[in-house]
Image (cartoon, rainbow, N blue to C red):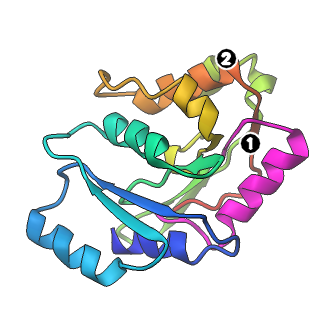
């Protein structure tokens, strides 16, 4: 969690805010320790008692957000310093409503595997793109807040909620892939 939030704080394009929605994945003691280390003007913590579904936390974050754009970052992931700048540049260049990118898998043995993203339209749509095991990593998503509020995460899904969400976004809104991988 520390690495995750610190990577958001270290962005070359400073975020308006960083919302941390604790959904019961850490103990209360560890959560207090994390909050003490990360407190600052950008970081706001919210406790979702009894919430064990990331989709609930993601929807709540979008509802609480003050900006026009929402970026997601799971607690076990982190961004390269230019993630937000590159994502927003791609969004603006394409006049798009959401962006997605690939990911770098960091393995215990120190090796890494980069899974680059591509243009889902070249596959005939987002469903075909994902079925061919193409990358659209959840922690790479940057979306217009209005799009998330109009087409939220399905809080009833326990698996494949990221696929469901990005497919519905792609069916309704204009998307763009970010060519450089900035998510770990």
- Residue 182 lies left or right of residue 177; in this view the side is left
Secondary structure of residue under mark 2: helix
- Residue 21 lies left or right of residue 125; in this view the side is left
- The residue shown at (37%, 71%) is 109
163 vs 87: above or below = above
Q: Which residue is mark 1?
A: 177
- The residue shown at (11%, 64%) is 28
Q: For the view shown, which residue lies furthest in the right direction?
A: 93
Q: Earlier in the sequence, mark 2 or mark 1?
A: 2
- Residue 137 lies left or right of residue 89; in this view the side is left
Range of magenta residues: 77-100
Neighbours of disc 2 within 10 Å: few (<14), some (14-19), many (20+): few
Query: Which x, y percent locates residue 170?
Result: 67, 24
- The residue shown at (42%, 36%) is 59
Quadrant in the picture for residue 120: top right
Q: Which mark is residue 171?
A: 2
Secondary structure of residue under mark 1: strand
Q: Nearer the viewer, residue 181 or 82?
A: 82
């Amino acid at each position: 969690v520390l690495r995750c939030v610190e990577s958001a704080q270290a962005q070359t394009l400073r975020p308006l805010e960083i919302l941390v929605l604790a959904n019961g994945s850490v103990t209360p003691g560890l959560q207090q320790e994390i909050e003490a280390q990360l407190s600052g003007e950008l970081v706001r913590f919210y406790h979702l008692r009894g919430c064990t579904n990331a989709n609930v936390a993601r929807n709540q974050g979008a509802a609480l957000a003050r900006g026009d754009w929402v970026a997601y970052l799971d607690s076990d992931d982190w961004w390269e310093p230019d993630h937000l700048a590159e994502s927003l540049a791609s969004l603006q260049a394409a006049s798009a409503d959401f962006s997605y990118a690939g990911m770098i898998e960091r393995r215990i043995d120190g090796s890494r595997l980069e899974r680059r993203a591509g243009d889902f339209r070249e596959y005939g749509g987002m469903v075909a793109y994902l079925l061919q095991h193409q990358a659209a990593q959840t922690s790479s998503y940057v979306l217009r807040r209005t799009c998330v509020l109009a087409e939220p995460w399905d809080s009833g899904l326990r698996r494949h909620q990221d696929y469901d969400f990005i497919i519905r976004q792609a069916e309704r809104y204009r998307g763009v892939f970010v060519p450089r991988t900035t998510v770990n």
